[in-house]
Every structure is written in C-alpha cells, then in structure tokens.
Amino acid sequence: MWIINAIVVHLLLLGSIFVIYFRSPIITGLTPQHPISLEPPAKRLVLIVTDGLRAESFFRNGCNDIPHLSQLMLKTNGLVGVSHTRVPTESRPGHIALIAGLYEDPSAVTRGWKRNPVNFDSVFNRSSYTYAWGAADVLHIFSSMGGVESEKRLLIDAYDHELDFSGRDETYKLDEWVFKRVRQLLSRKDVELRRQEKVIFFLHLLGLDTAGHVHKPGTPNFLENLHRTDKGISEIYKEFERIFPDNRTAYVLTSDHGMTNSGSHGSSDTFETETPFFLWGAGIASNVSYDIEFTIGEDTTRPLYAIQQAQLTPLMAALIGVAPPVNSIGMIPLQFLNASDEYKAHAIHTNALQLLAQFQALLIAHQRGLFSRNLLGYSKLNAEIITQYIESTEHKLQSGQFAEAIFTSYNVMQHTLEGMEYYQGYYRKPLQISTAATFIFWIIYCLQLLLGQQRRVKRFYWRWSLTIGQKLSLLLACVFLLLQRVPMVIAFYLLLPLLVWILLVQKQGVSLLPLIRAMPLFQLLALILCAELFVYSFFERKLIALSFLIYSLVINFRAFPGNNAKLYIWLPLSVCLAIFPLLPPSVGYANTWLLLLGMFATMIRPFVVKSHVHWHIKLPAMVCIINALLASFWHAQQRGVPLLSQALSWLFLIYTLSVIILYRTSVLKQRIELIFYLLTSLYALLCTSYESLFIVMLASELMLTLSVQPIQLPIAHKLEEQFSKDKMRHVVSSPQQLQVALRLSFSILLYTLFSFFGTGNIASVSSFDPNIVRCFLSTFSPFIIMALVILKLVIPVLLNISIIFGMSRFARDNEQTIFVCLMLICDVMGLNFLFLVRNEGSWLEIGTSISHFVIMEVTTVVLVIFTYFAKLLLRLNEKARNEE
C-alpha cells in the first residue's frame, strides 16, 4: 500500500508546481476594445518573422552577413534593436508573444503544438484582413481563433514541411517559396489590395530555423541561407513599395526565438532569448533617444534599441489603428510611433483600457469569496480608481491635454500589470507553504517506514480523539475554501498537507537517532555533502564531478582490499570519468574522433572482460555500429543517410529489445553482460560525440565497484529473515544493514544524475541536438524524435539499475528498503528545489528553477518504475543463478 501512496504523493507534488506557476494567463470572456477612431499612420502592415534568427547572427561582423538589410537600414533610417523573448524559446510561444501579446502558459507547448488548448485573441483578429504565408504548423495556431468571422479575415497559404536533417535539402527554398507566393498575390490582386485598410501581410520564413537545426548557426550553409533571405526580404520590400506607392506601409522584421551554437532552442541562453528587430516605413519614428549603438560596415554607427517581445503587438495594432488583442499584456513603446500627440494619447488609452479589462476580470473573480473583504487585496488599483481614471482621461482627450493623458495612462498600465500579476499569483505563497508541509510530512512518513517505528496508540479514547480532530480540521478547511470560492485545483493542493498528515498520524514516534547511528559520522557527512552538491549540480554541472569523486574516494575506495589489481584499474577510471563534466558543452555537440573511440570501446569491451556474449549477438551489434559510423560520415558530408542504413538501425533497435526480453539464460552474470553489450551498442547509434565512451566507462566502473563491495550474503539473509516475519513493515534495526541500503540507494541516484550531467544533458528538456537521430531519420517527425531522445536518456539509467540489482544480492532482497532510502534522498533534494524556486525577478530565472523541481520529482517516480523494469529484464522472478 505504501508504494501506491508514494507514487500518488509524488505525482501530486509534481502537479503542484504547475498549479503554483504554470496556470494559464489567458482570461476568457473579455470584450475587444473599439478601434482607434483617428486616422492611423499606416494602412497596411508587413510582418516578417525570420524563424530562429538570433540577434548575434544579425549584428555580427558589422552586419556584413545581411548587406541588403544594412543598406535598407541606412536608407530608411528605421529603428533597429534587440527584442528580448521569454522561455520556452519555441516557435509556438514566440509567435504567440509577437502576434497575441501574451506569454503563453509554457505547459501548453506540451499540450498542443498543432491545436490550441486555450483560445486567445490576436492582432490578426483585430485586422480587416490578414494574408499569411509560411509553415502550416505555425500559421494554423491562429486560424481557429475567433470563430468563423476570424477565419474569413485570415487567408492562409501554407506548406506542410518536414524538416530534413540530412543536409541534402536547400533550406533557403522554404523562404523562396514564401516570396514567390507573395509576389503572385500582389500581382493578381493589386487593385483590390490598394483599397483595403487595416491589412496585415504575415511572412513566416522558416529557412533559417531549419538551416540552424541542420547546419548550425555561423556555418557556410547557414550563412548561405541568411544571404538569400536577406536578399529576398529586400526584393519583397521593393515589390510592396511598387504595388503600394502611397507611403502608407509599415514594416516589422523580427524573429520568434534565437538558437544556440548547437542548433537547439527552448532554454534561456542569451543566444536563444535575444532576437533582432527592424522597424521602418509609415508610422515609425526616426528620432528616438538611445543609449548604445551598433556598427554597420566598418565605421557607420546607428542607435541600438531594446524592446520586450510582447510590446510589438500593441505597436503593430497602433500602426494600423486597431485595438490590441484582448489577452495582450504588452505596453506600447510610444516613443517608436511617429504620429500626432492626439493619436498617441488615444492609442495608449486604448492599450490601458484593454489591460484594465483583464485586471477587472481578475478583481471580480477575487471578490466573489465571502471573506474577500477581510483578505489582502491590491491597494494601488480598485474599481473606484479605474472609474476615476477613465473619466479623467476621456476629459483630457476631449480638452486636448494629450501629454497629461499619456502620462496618466502610462502609470495606470504599470499598476494594472502589477495588479494582474498580484491576483494571478494570489495563492502562490499559501501553495508554496502547503507544498513544503506536504514534503515534510511525507519525509517523516518515509523515515517511519525506514526505521520501523510504528508504535500504534493503544488508548482507545486518544485514537478516537485523533480521528475526530482530523475530521474536524478537514471539514473546517473545506468549508472555508468553499465559502471563499477558491478554484477547485488550488483548494485541493491547500488541503493536501492535511491529507498526508492524516496518513502520518497513524504512526507515532519519530527519532533520527537510529539513522545517525547507522553510519559512521564521516560517511554520513559525505553523503549529505554529495546530496547538496547534487542540488547545485543542476545549476553548475561541473559540481557532479566533485560529488562523484567525494563518493568514490570516501566510500568506494574502502571497498578495495589493499594491493588489489582491480584498485589500479578502478582509480584511473574514476578520475577519467570525473573529467567529462568539466568539458565545455561544445565538445559534446559533435566530435568524430571521440565518437569513433566510444564505438570502438563498445565493440572491444566484451573481448577485454571475456564476457559470455555469444557471437550471434556480437556480430549484429558490430555490423550496426559500423553502419552508424558510415551514417555519421555520410551525414557530415551532407550526402544524406541512405534508407537502407536507416532501416538497418531500426531493425537493430527491434532486435535489441527482442533479444533482451526473449533470450533464455539462467545465469545472472550472462544476462548482465548481454544487457550491457546490447544497450551500449544501441546507445552508440544515438551519439554524436563522447557519450558512448562515457557510458561504457561509467557502467564498467560501477560493475568493478560492486564486484568488491563488502555486501556479504549473511547480512542479506539476516535482513531477509527479518522482513519475512512481517512483510507489511520496514524494520531496519542493524546499523550495518541501513548503511548498505543507504549506500546502494545513493549509488542509484548518483549514477543516474552522473549519466545525465556527464554527457551534458538536462540543460533543458527541449535543448537537444536533432542530429542524434541521423541513423534513424532524415525528416522532422517530432513524436519519433522525442521517443528516440527519451530512449537515449533512459538507456544509461536502465543499464545502471540493472547492474546494481544484478550484482547485489542485498539490493534484490531488500529493494523496498533501498527504494525508501532513495525516496528520502530525492524528497530532501525536492524540498531544496522548492525553496530555490524564484518567484521574483525575471521569468527566465523562475522558469529554470521550476524545471529543476520537475526533473527531480520525475526522477523519483521514474527510478521506481525502472527498478521493477530492470528486475523483469534480469528475470529475477525466475530465480536466476548468480555466478560470482
């Protein structure tokens, strides 16, 4: 029963972080504001989004890589600068921030890429017509918003694109397709288009994003795509000016997100969050104050501006005279707008009313509760202040006090955004406290399970009073939350500590003294230090090397008897393993020689250790590893991986899983070697650099360590007898037994995290190199790619757990005790991460700290699943013989 409790509690703790931080910012039921009644500075807007173009690629070398746009900057005297995005730096959230003005709930990226989990408004809905060209998966994000009327406004011409990672395709042809279709429309409907107003032309250019993924930013192939896109934008600008010679066209050029040097995006690296923007044409100011400059060519300088990505939405709306989208949180950068003071005052007032509508919806929802008047509220803004602002601003607009109206609207917008953040995070602090309490109660519960302290209360009246107290507390809490009309999900998580407490009070008496006595103080302090280093390894992965060395030298070193030959193999192996996390990340992106060395180590190891893996298993693995080397060579030469080579890789994947599951052997050591060889061979097919070498070395070091661990069978049998007396309880009375259980549980977590950090993973869930699937795929298939990425992360974990449970009799006999120890360590780390979560400062810091908590909670549940899966692979239920 306790296992079910453990899984349920950890899944609920994992969900708590989404309730606290990942609640959708989209407010439903809002009414759009009226369009600006004055004549707008522009009749039409051309929005060009160069998908995946980072600011560094735009501005480097004095903008020499974009010569045509450089000339356009000098000719038009437009505004150029850096747009700051937010994580996750993916195409969907980036386009929504640009076009809808809101930073969408990050969890929506996983809930729906090709369809919207929550409806939202966009600047396309506010326009009279929007003509859009580009990739279907991006354009169709906005096609279903606003019902039938919106669909009539949005006219889409899209292509279904499959990203080819082989390098055979010329990625710039994606952009040329868009330019060609735009010219066709302009020439075909030029007369009709000239009559239309409040029109948006949206050009989504995917070529640079594709080139960055396939070739990496800064490479010759990427620069070729950039040069062609640069020239194409310049030519399409001239075409627009030829069709519309009235000087009433505004142009906005920007990007949805950037990209790292490895061709990935999704995280908070500067290369990913800084994108360029270039504004020119009708309605764009030219004389704007600035602080810094950038260089065009060798000696020409121009002002460099900065803007938040969501601020472009109200600016685009103001350029063509429409209201901002109802869900936008962007504040219009009024200094960028070239218009009369009257128009600027009306534009910023419309922006303020649109933000106030969202605040009022949140305020009304908060005031529905019975006790809301007695609870804290946002004091800088309320219904009376809002009414007073609207009346005074309308009076100022009518009397021509435009400067005062702009100043007042700007202050109100700042308070409105603060108030929206206040009420959207109103229950954040209580939820943090309740989640921390849930952690603490669960940790105490685990300690009771581990130490076997289950002294039940004997007196009936005390047990009866406990039951009444529990029910009364739960009832009062439920009544309060119901009368306050707290949302159901939030109410549940506020009650969760109470539910865990009810589970906890069924046991009495908790003492940490047996835990302290179970291990020598020096080793216990080493374990605590390594656990804290684990926590900070999520911020600096080099610290995992220090954790590994401390654990190896303090604990594992003692396992080796003096003058043992294995010691002189293990010691340099451990030192070499500690070097891998110190390598710069760029080394792990692609290194042919390290890849070759890793594959050679995978093939040669069975011969070195004289494993009992049969030739009919070795031979297919060797063939596939050689095939992977050829595929790597073909891919590097941009020839494309042949279909036959990919088919061979898929067949080996199926062969590996089939052999591990179906191969019959009663010798446990043979099964370990079989799993080792097949999983590392399969892993080599997914590597681009030193990963396979690292995993082979790490698993070999683990086997070497366990082979000399002083885990004697009499200890295991003694504990097994103790467990057989009462299988419903966890009784660990011997300090020596608890020491072994803690050591093994810590080893599982250490080697799991080390296998991740040692290969440079866990920077971000989405920061992976798509080239790892080159042996299996050439085109972009997101679900298959994600499955292969997960497989690459899973293989080292499954391999390490299989080795531990295969080589340790104690681990097999006492897996429940080890799991409780493992759960304790993970929960202590999770509690650390809960308090390290940033709820102030930039969203980038908040998002990064939340991802650490999520990874830790997932690790807890996943290790439980893998433990039982490893037992199935080892066929431990078939009473396999363990040949030492």
Image (spheres, helix red, strand yellow):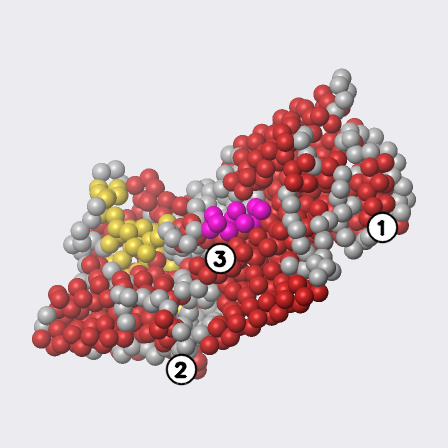
Q: Quadrant of the N terminus?
A: bottom right
Q: Is residue 644 magenta?
A: no
Find out whether the residues at labels 1 and 3 contact each other: C-beta distance under 8 Å: no
Q: Main secondary structure of the magenta part?
A: helix
CA gap, disc 1 and disc 3 = 40 Å
* Residue 339 in the image, given as x and y percentages of width and height: 16, 66
In the picture of the structure, the residue carrying the numbered disc 1 is 725
Which dot marks residue 100? none
**If you read the primary sequence from the N terminus, does the residue marked by circle 2 or circle 3 appear first?**
2
Look at discs 2 and 3 and give the one toward the viewer. Answer: 3
Q: Amino acid at mark 1?
A: Lys
Find out whether the residues at labels 2 and 3 contact each other: C-beta distance under 8 Å: no
**If you read the primary sequence from the N terminus, does the residue marked by circle 1 or circle 3 appear first?**
3
In the picture of the structure, the residue carrying the numbered disc 2 is 149
* Residue 696 in the image, given as x and y percentages of width and height: 70, 35
User: Looking at the image, which residue is at 46% across and 68% down?
Assistant: 141
In the picture of the structure, the residue carrying the numbered disc 3 is 433
Q: Nearer the viewer, residue 268 or 809?
A: 809
User: Looking at the image, which residue is at 26% across and 77% down?
Assistant: 35
